[in-house]
């Protein structure tokens, strides 16, 4: 009999989460195939099946997940009748919210205030989830909206002892994302950060994950424009085509776009998107410009447009132009599912701490011991393939 794996989602009422849940529920019902799931063709010993996954989670939004999904405009009414009807019966657990950390996203479905109280409630929710669904294991994945970056001199983020003191003092430097990560890691539950928000990558939480041997991975899911950058930039480098400038712009109208309409949240996103190119090419692209615009009529139909200026043999100039029109959540949801399955596999193998093998899923891969991340997609894919098949280190 297969093990049941619970996926507890922060932001479970969001477009990515409801799309992921609907897709898996439709697979269980036989009304969806495995298209678009990157690891569907891998036969990895010990990895949970898609039908083994059970979903729950937290969100500030009230109402059932079916209503949330319809509001996002990714799923149709037919989807919610054709295998994904269970979303109508699912409601989010009260969530931690903070307008100070995410100015444009709010809701009334809140848990009690206070850091310690929130951590206790998150762990109680996980225990209840496990009991109610008869789960064998769980993972937590952050699919919530982007929070602002913390200040560099925040005392509570300097060490685990300082973080514990900050929790006691309800230090505002400790964000909701960090509270969820702390609660999950402390409860021995693997945690992934699909957002640009600071969470398990802050010093005290990375230390806690290593000390407790709990698998963590992040951050910021690599879905569209940056995914293509990490595929194309290595090829330009290897063909000695010098990148003089790379102009990237995005328009989207979903809740992610609304969150990024706040300059402080936007700064977090631009930080993770902007670090990739120079690392791959080995030199600084002086005119690397990234713009993200909230454009409500577009909804989840994101458009990413890139112009790349190049210099080749004999100093000749040329250009490369890319236009990617995509469903933001249709790209992101399968990655979230695969990350959950990989983290559960790491837990089964007894492999805790930062799981660098999952780097290809993220724009800013979290690394252990201050190492620089690998951004080139082909090398990231090789790293993941090796880990899936060979198993990596033990214990």
Image (cartoon, rainbow, N blue to C red):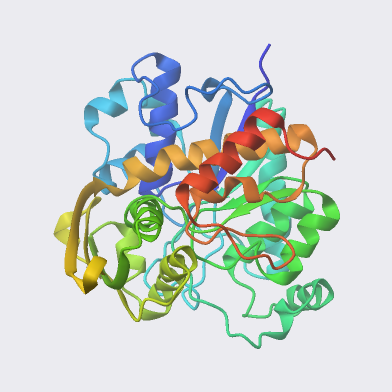
Residue at 85% x, 57% y: name it. Answer: 211
Q: Image quarter for residue 37? A: top left
Q: Nearer the viewer, residue 27 or 135?
A: 27
Whether residue 154 is situated above or below residue 62 in the rendered picture: below
Residue at 39% x, 45% y: name it. Answer: 332
Whether residue 74 is situated above or below residue 37 in the rendered picture: below
Residue 159: x and y in percent read 79, 75
Residue 368: x and y in percent read 71, 60
- Left/right of residue 383 with respect to residue 37 in the rendered view: right
Residue at 74% x, 73% y: name it. Answer: 167
Q: Is residue 142 visible?
A: yes
Residue 261: x and y in percent read 31, 73
Residue 341: x and y in percent read 59, 34
Image quadrant holding the C terminus, namely top right
Q: Image quarter for residue 334? A: top left
Q: Is residue 129 visible?
A: no
Q: Nearer the viewer, residue 133 or 75?
A: 75
Whether residue 114 is situated above or below residue 240 in the rendered picture: below
């Amino acid at each position: 009999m297969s093990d049941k794996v619970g996926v507890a989602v922060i932001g479970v009422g969001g477009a990515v989460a409801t799309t992921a849940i609907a897709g898996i529920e439709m697979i269980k019902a036989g009304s969806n195939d495995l298209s678009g799931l990157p690891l569907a063709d891998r036969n990895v010993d010990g990895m949970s099946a898609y039908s083994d996954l059970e979903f729950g989670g937290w969100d500030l939004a009230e109402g059932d997940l079916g209503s949330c999904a319809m509001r996002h405009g990714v799923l149709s009414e037919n989807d919610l009748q054709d295998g994904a009807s269970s979303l109508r019966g699912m409601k989010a657990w009260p969530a931690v919210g903070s307008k100070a950390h995410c100015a444009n996203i709010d809701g009334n479905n809140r848990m009690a205030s206070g850091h310690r109280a929130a951590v206790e409630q998150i762990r109680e929710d996980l225990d209840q989830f496990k009991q109610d669904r008869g789960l064998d294991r769980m993972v937590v994945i952050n699919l919530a909206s982007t929070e602002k970056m913390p200040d560099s001199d925040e005392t509570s983020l300097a060490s685990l002892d300082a973080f514990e003191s900050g929790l006691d003092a309800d230090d505002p430097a400790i964000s909701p994302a960090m509270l969820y990560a702390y609660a999950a890691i402390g409860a021995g539950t693997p945690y992934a950060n699909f957002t640009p928000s600071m969470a398990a990558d802050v010093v005290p939480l990375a230390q806690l994950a290593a000390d407790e041997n709990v698998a963590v991975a992040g951050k910021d899911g690599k879905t569209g424009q940056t995914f293509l950058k990490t595929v194309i930039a290595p090829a330009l480098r290897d063909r000695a085509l010098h990148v003089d400038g790379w102009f990237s712009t995005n328009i989207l109208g979903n809740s992610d776009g609304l969150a990024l309409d706040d300059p402080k949240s936007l700064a977090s996103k631009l930080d993770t998107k902007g670090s990739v190119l120079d690392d791959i090419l080995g030199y600084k692209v002086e005119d690397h410009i990234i713009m993200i615009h909230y454009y409500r009529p577009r909804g989840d139909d994101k458009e990413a447009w890139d112009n790349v200026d190049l210099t080749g043999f004999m100093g000749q100039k040329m250009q490369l132009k890319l236009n990617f029109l995509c469903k933001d959540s249709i790209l992101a949801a399968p990655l979230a599912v695969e990350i959950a399955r990989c983290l559960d596999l790491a837990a089964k193998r007894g492999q805790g701490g930062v799981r660098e093998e999952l780097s290809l899923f993220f724009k800013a891969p979290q690394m252990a011991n201050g190492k620089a991340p690998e951004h080139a997609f082909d090398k990231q894919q090789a790293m993941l393939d090796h880990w899936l098949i060979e198993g990596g280190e033990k214990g």
